[in-house]
Amino acid sequence: MPRTRLIILALILSALAFGLHTSAEATEIAAGVAIFLIGMMALENGFKVFTGGTLERLLQRSTDKLWKSLSFGVVATTVTQSSSLVSVITISFLSAGLLGLTQGVGIIFGANLGTTTGAWLIAGLGLRVNVAAYAMPMLIFGVVLSFTSSKTLKGLGNVLTGLGFLFLGIHYMKEGFETFGQSIDLAEYAVPGLAGLMLFTAIGVFATVVMQSSHATLVLIITALAAGQITYENALALSIGANVGTTITAIIGSISANIAGRRLAAAHLIFNLTTGILALVFIRQFVVAVELGADWLGIAPNDHTLKLALFHSLFNLTGIALMLPLMSRLVVFLETHLKPAPSTVSSPRFINETMMQMPDAGLEAARKEIGHLFANVFDIMALVLHADPIRLRKGEQLELLANAPERVREIDVDDYYRRRVKPLHADILDFLARLPTEDKQSRQAFVLRAATQHLIEALKDLKHLQKNMVRYLVSPNPYLRKEYVAIRQHLALILHHLHRLATGEEENPTLAFDVLAASMQSHDIVGNGTLDRLIREKRISPEVASSLMNDNGYAYDISRNLLALARTAFMPHEYVDKQLENALHLDKQELEAILATTSQAGSTENEGSRI
Amino acid sequence: MNFKRMIDKLGLLLSADRRMQEEKKKKLKELLKKMKAEQKRLKIAIAHCNDPDARADFELKLQILTEQRKKGVNLRKRLAGKA
């Protein structure tokens, strides 16, 4: 921790200790805030478990249009009562490339409006009902449920415990301010006019930065206002400050995020700063609008807590109304001014620290990063096979692979591996090892880790194969040359088709995969008798045959490893899709039976010229 | 909506297993339809193909697809039996 931060923390703790030592009421209020924050944490954890990925699935499915993103932000924040949880999920999804910046910004705008429902709930229910009476049974049932083994019940238990602590925290804050009011009247220290507006806005920002929760600040403001410890005008300024201060959580969260996450945090800051300035400049007009709105909604003239909730909603709604038409410009501005740091081919593009809180998004990002790793390996393999990586990806001039290359050169695979593969592979392994996964997620992480190993094995085998390939691709013996050309062509075509699978270009991945698996079987020259025939007919010497047999083994292993990688990383992986894929997929025996019938029909001649 | 259908819908809403089973059936139905169209397309391609290598490729694909579809049809029958 930097020294300045340590000093600030020490100062805050000392002030807090002094406050707690001198005033029993301050202790009660501070304990209320602490209990409230514990409740927020338990509620967030509970929702993460309880929803079992529902929030994430909703996020993916219901954010294709701006109004849907906005609605998602409003509804998700209203239900979970945590804009931080919604922000963190959004940043994770944006960083993983599962969400566009426009959708992300829409969600954040919606979350800003959704978070204002908290003020309504506290002002409308929290202060009128004896919430502590509900807190106790909630805590008891919550704790009992959190001891169960069922994930859903455990999550539900956490949600109940969270709500119980929230209610208990509100109760203590309310009690604290009421007792405080009997001895000291803080309202005497109210600062009127512009100075008060600026001072209390700054206090609101500071309080939210310290507590890392605008929700907690708002509860504190509302309970203090209800107890008459702060004036209505100062409470309005405090709520503006809380709205600006809440962006700090997103900014801190985005420090470890990639550029997409940082852009979203910047959008959050711009939105909240703009609405904050707007509310400060037009405070009189907002107060008039609140009076009119309160009258229309039937809120009593002296009910300042509900009026504060209305003010909070109104200025956030105004902010959204003003910023929505400028959304596309804001996105362009962010993309132009916040550019990604120059990255190397071996730096991760999808995985980052923000995903540590969202294992599902993290696994998806890891899968995409493995696609990136495959792209790097693809380039090296294409060079070793004397194929242009760009053309091979596009499938251009594939027929030329049936001939030996004009020039043959050896590629330094180790050097390429060290520069383009090893650092990225290490980052993926480190990420998967640290990702907090459970049950199915742990299995997925294990399988993804194994997939990267398959890819590295394939590259290492190609390095060994290269030694003889550069020699025999230009061999004067046409039979030997033909076999090495066939190996090269087969591997290059497998790479091309795997690229199509990785990029989702294959319409029927299960069919494409099984065709590749059949091609792997048919190219086993030991298994199909080609090697024996070449030796019998004295087309190649037994010494060369030994090399060819080893290299055929390498080619088989490369294909097998690449297909194993594809099965894990490139094939459908959503639960139902994966189940269907597994059910329809043909096993080795089934493929061999098909190959035997095609062979009998005499239709597998010149296999070397096909995949 | 009659009472039985309403109970059925409620059951579907409450049971994650049943929801998944229904999704599986729906996706399998779509997949089989696509596979059938692909089979037809491959048969036409084979009939019009003069290049023996390309023809052999098409035939291999068709055979694999036929086997996969056969498995899919069996799975659909099993799923229908379970319901």
Image (cartoon, grey):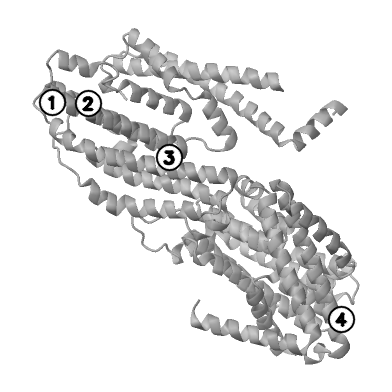
Residue at 64% x, 87% y is A14
Give percent across and percent down for residue A517: 39, 26
Give percent across and percent down for residue A8: 57, 83
Give percent across and percent down for residue A105: 58, 59
Discs 3 and 4 share one subunit:
yes
Q: Are marks 3 and 4 in contact (CB under 8 Å)?
A: no
State the mark number for residue A549.
2
Q: Residue furthest top?
A: A601
> From mark 4 to mark 1, how far is it between C-alphas?
96 Å
Earlier-in-chain disc, 3 versus 4: 4
Of circles 4 and 2, which is in front?
Answer: 2
Residue at 86% x, 86% y is A181
At label 4, the amino acid type is Glu
Secondary structure at numbered mark 1 = helix
> From mark 1 to mark 2, how far is it between C-alphas?
10 Å
Q: Where, by quadrant of the figure, is residue A231 drawn?
A: bottom right
Q: Which residue is mark 4?
A: A178
Q: Is residue A510 visible?
A: yes
Discs 3 and 1 share one subunit:
yes
